[in-house]
Amino acid sequence: MEILEDKPGKKILLLGNEAITRGALEAGVDIATTYPGTPSSEIADTFSLIARSFTKQKKDPGFYFEYSTNEKVALEVAAAGSFSGLRVLTCMKHVGLNVASDTFMTYLYIGCKGGHVIVSADDPSCHSSQNEQDNRFYALFGSAPMLEPSTPDEAREMTRQGFEISEELKLPLLLRTTTRLNHARGPIKLKKMKKPHGRGHFEKDPMLVTVPAVARAQHPILLKKMEQAEKISEKSPFNKLISIGKPNEWGIITSGVSFNYVKEVAEDLNLNVRILKLGMTHPLPKKMCKNFLSSCKNIIVVEELEPILEDQLKNMAFDLGCTVKIFGKRTGHFSRLYEYNPDIVGEVFSKIFKVKKPYSIPKKSDISLPSRPPALCPGCPHRATYYAVKMAKPRGVIYPTDIGCYTLGKAPPYEVADLLLCMGSNAGTACGLSVATDQKIISFMGDSTFFHSGIPPIIDAVHHNHDVVITVLDNRTTAMTGHQPNPGTEFDGMGRPAKGIRVEDVVKGCGVKHVEVVDPNNIKETTAAFKRALDFKGPSVVVSKSPCILLENRDKRKAGEKIPVYTIDQDKCKNCKLCISRFSCPAFYYGEDDLIFIDEQQCNGCGNCATVCPFDAIHPKKEAKK
Amino acid sequence: MKDKINIVLTGVGGQGVITAANILGKAAVKADVNVFVSEVHGMAQRGGSVNCTVRLGKVSGPLVPSGTADVIVSTEPTEALRYIHYANSQTQIITDIVPVIPFTVSVGMEKYPDVDKVFKELENYGKLFKIDAVQLAKDAGALITKNIVMLGALAGTDILPFKKEILLDTILSNVPAKYRDMNKKAFENGYNVTKKK
């Protein structure tokens, strides 16, 4: 594996996320934990890939890796490793840190021992997220040192050095990244790999037990550590000045991926400016910033999302009593919405510097293009479940849903997604709706979401006897983020055999009296199960269990089994269009003379369309595909 | 040689666009040329619109400014038009001629435009190379090599700041030995379409 090569100086191309994994390996990381979430997933998936390849060869990769139950657990597992003197890393998507925030806030009071890098992958523009919160606030909120890389190689180096900063300060460090860093590839200059510690040792210390007296004693220690962190920030090689053209009284302060756009636009506009590129953005190098502020007449602050740098810099300018003009979000030049790009930065700079825009966007074409929205895959078991729910003919039902592929049930013809907040919210909001309304409720969550945060609201439903139907769409994997294992699977992230916990056992253990496990590919039985669940007074759970079709077919191919392909017998077909209008599998299409066909390339061979067809016109083709 | 080269690769999920971008990036590193690649993940799965950018030379980040693409390589005609804001009058647009019909069209919710009109429109934006990559890939041995045909066509434009052999070597070192001949053929098939005689 190229990523494991111990050849300092060698250049290889890595994804930003892979570069973070490499940086951790160069720092000799002992434990890595996560809960998968885009755009962070490939950091952990790379650890998993390495670990699985070692496990296969019956060797030890030198580190422990796990896909934890949720982000809070992931942070706690890693923190305990740090308390035992080991170097640890935890990665998650931005909203994952909300789940882990209870641990995070008090963890900072206690501080760590072995270096701990916590990676937050923020998602400006919500490419694959329910919000675009700016997690830099967490560094300010909890008092954590923070680094923000601009390029994949910088991400590698910041991860590597992040462990050292964390150990020096005895504080976990936040490595804050964004989608355009996580999912950008760039050349990486490899550094030497460090050997992991192996086993740690936990030294008992009463200051690790945060009773109120300890918390009161730890808080001032944390503030002292931040003073020390500021000194590190002043000297950090990640905070630096860059001149473009002949520098004058104009300055730009920027961080993260915004730096790339600033540099490009400044060069393309032939500007004469100095850029203060901040890589350690909490605590800020106050002296460095103040020197910069007092040497400029005009400053532009370029940062995606919230005006975090801008407001801190304004505070500093006030302290200095200097009259520097600061352009940014507060002056209305930059937006607090969505990610930036060279076009956006170019347009704002052209306004501020009163010059022509650096890039000309060609006129839009008049030809309207068809959209290509994401849809449930052909053969997806969720489609069968949703079809069965609709067949149960529920009247006026509210469908709280959750985070996963099945959120795509929002689209017609299913329209089985009415309410979604965050991981696990389906069942919690279902409970609330049952109290607030007389409407029937069927909620949906996946197996991974169930283990992540779906269990406490089920306990709430049992304890208060809420009249809800909670569905667990158990496709035996964490599908949307890339098929990671979860507590329900029979193997773990290191490729070792693991105890697969059965959803129905947990639910029964919570005290749910009406529990049914169905195979959604048996649409008739599944429909009947939903009818019974709706008739039941009190909480009921339907576990709709069938593996993700992509995984199932992958296993079939590996085993040399053929995957059937379905076809329409045009003599029997009455063109009722039910397969398209109600079942809506993307493998169907209208062909010649408005006849309906199945695209063999797309068909995944689930065969549910054959059940759905009222005229028995759909059959497996004689020749199956490989 | 230009000091910055901007390449936009577009297509439909499952056509190997991200793989092609990654291979191009690896070839650049092999040739010791600075490179950044951006890609899309997550919800953009099979059947969705895919857009990657590859930037070579004196560049500081992976995103291509509007109107600055040197080449747009598209594995699907309408997808070339979807990302046409990257083009200027000098941009070379290489597109496969075979449409991929989205399910929104196949179920009658939307319309797919007349493909000849799409080509005509693309000619208004830049220099168009139409390429029957589906056929050229099949000629090479398998449809799956279509993205390699497109990389061959890109190499034929002479825009790359390194020898085409470096790109071909990178492709071949990224596929199993038994598929090497097929991929070599696919690459050459694409190369011969755009290469100036």
Image (cartoon, helix red, strand yellow):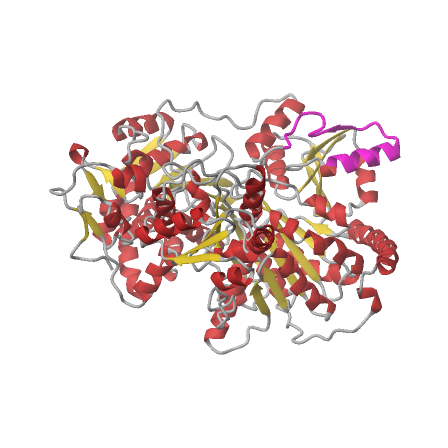
> In this rendering, does residue B34 appear at all?
no
Q: Position of residue A471 (x, y in %)?
A: 46, 51
Name the foreground residue: B102 vs A24: B102
Name the foreground residue: B186 vs A489: A489
Asked if residue A206 lies in the magenta stretch, the reply is: no
Where is A269 relative to B23, above or below?
Answer: above
Asked if residue A314 lies in the magenta stretch, the reply is: yes
Determine the image quadrant of residue A562.
Answer: bottom left
Q: Could you tell me which residue is drawn at 31 percent across and 54 percent down?
A: A522
Relative to residue A91, is residue A571 drawn left or right? left
Relative to residue A276, is residue B149 drawn left or right? left
Q: Position of residue B61 (x, y in %)?
A: 56, 43
Q: Could you tell me which residue is drawn at 72 percent across and 71 percent down?
A: A84
Q: Position of residue B112 (x, y in %)?
A: 29, 31
Where is A30 relative to B27, above or below?
Answer: below
Name the foreground residue: A282 vs A568: A568
What is the magenta range? A310-336
Residue at far left of view: A571
Q: Quadrant of the C terminus of chain A?
A: bottom left
Where is A197 relative to B62, above or below?
Answer: below
> In this rendering, does residue A144 appear at all?
yes
Q: Position of residue A184 (x, y in %)?
A: 53, 48
Q: Could you tell me which residue is drawn at 30 percent across and 46 percent down?
A: B191
Residue at far bottom of view: A58
Q: How many marks?
A: 0
